[in-house]
Image: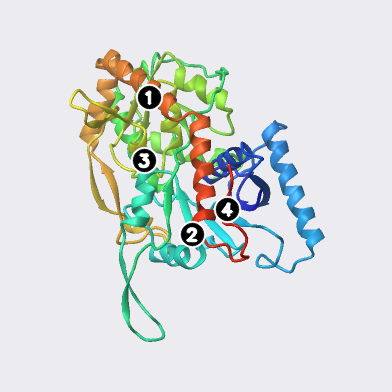
Amino acid sequence: MKKIIIKAPVLSRSGYGEQARFAIRALSSRPDLFDLYIINIPWGHTGMIMGNSEERELLDALVYKTTQHMSDCGAAGPESAYGFDASLQITIPPEFEKMAPINIGYTAGIETTQVAPLWIQHTNSLMDKIITISEHSRTSFADVEYESVDPGTGNRHKLVLEVPIDVVNYPTREAEAEEIEIPFETHTNFLVVSQWGPRKNMENTVKWFMETFKDDPDVGLILKTNIVSDSLGDREKVSTYLQDFLNNFPDRQCKTYLLHGEISPGQLAWLYQHPSMKALINIGHGEGYGLPMFEAAYNGLPLIAIPWSGHMDYICRKNKKGKEVPSIIKVDYELRAVQPEAVWDNVVTAESKWAFPKASSFRRALKEAITKEEHYRNRAKLLQSQVIKNHTPEKIYEQFVQSVQDVFVETPDIKGASNVLLL
């Protein structure tokens, strides 16, 4: 049995928080192989998962177990001998560190065409392997090449990824629909589940939607969004900002419904399955995976999206010619350099690109979700069956477990013990 220390925002209500909890579910499915310990870290200003669920109890118990173990060992720091065989660090590469004889980075990568040079440097120097969530995220690491200068010699050399990288998608999760009290005045509705930020392209999403349906009082846009967290202060900011934005359309007849705060998986399922819902909208500039789109897909809701980035892993089906094609209401786009205001030092580089959806194509997609509803509903049902079949928890957990196991075989054991993990 291998002792694995997991450094991750396991209690965070965020994408990385969900990623961390998935990893723990996967590794916990094989208690005969792994002895888990957790160091919980914050993730920005996001809130924490609440409640007294079995999963929350498990996480709290593992955090407490880790604190006790480290205290009993009396070691001085993360590189000291706590007896861990490996670390699993669920974060972005600039936060990677040497924590154990073997170190695995589990990262969502980047939503653009390429990761920053620092990400590759830290990965090469600190990690024995990385696991990521989609083929898009993998290529943003593996297909990138920078020119680097050795500070000691001045010699130039190519900077490329030098450690193994695996892709493991997310699994589906069953949730019984739980009704949300929304006073719907409309019978034709569209859903957006996205954080309000530059990458998600929310301003254009709302603007182009209003321009398309401004004269139709029976069309509604449901926005499940926040800026940073699910706090009351954040809700006030979102509400004020959205109202100011909607004031640009004083004569609009279509309706807007704002959902803010924590909602359960069952409540999300209810939204995805609601009979008035025509499609989930996501015209963001890029996704590492796109969990709301994934959830909508396995709930049978049509998707309005661009055919690029992380969600390409699960939105495609084979056509009559055997070619994999996106089974969505497609929005055309072009790849261009990220906006100057989106550049983020050592995260989103000025050299990187992401997708810019075309307004005319988005408006067409919105209308077709209504005029060709039966066609897209049928395609969504076929995609739903495929996603459920290919992304069962058992299959995805096994893939993740195997990816972690492989590192013990691929990496020489510095303690000289057997490097074969028996199944």
Disc 3 secondary structure class: helix
Image point (30%, 64%), residue name: 145
Residue identifier under label 4: 88
Vertical order, 366 against 153 (above or below): above
Crowd band around label 2 with a 10 angstrom C-alpha radius: few (<14), some (14–19), many (20+): many
Residue 267, above or below 72: above
At label 1, counting other C-alpha atoms closer than 10 Å, the crowd grade (few under 14, some 14-19, many 20 or more) is some
Residue at left offset 49%, top offset 35%: 396
Quote the CA–CA distance across marks 2 and 3: 30 Å
Is the C-beta separation of discs 4 and 1 under 8 Å?
Answer: no
Q: Are marks 2 and 4 in contact (CB under 8 Å)?
A: no
Of the two numbered discs 2 and 4 in the rendering, the one whose residue sits closer to the viewer = 4
Q: Which label sits on residue 93?
A: 2
Residue bearing mark 3 = 203
* Residue closest to the eye, 326 or 15: 326
The CA span between labels 2 and 1 is: 33 Å
Label 3 – label 1 distance at C-alpha = 33 Å
The answer to which of marks 2 and 4 sits earlier in the sequence is 4
Choose between 178 and 73: the one closer to the eye.
Answer: 73
Circle 2 or circle 3, nearest the eye? 2
Within 10 Å of disc 3 (Cα), the crowding (few <14, some 14-19, many 20+) is: some
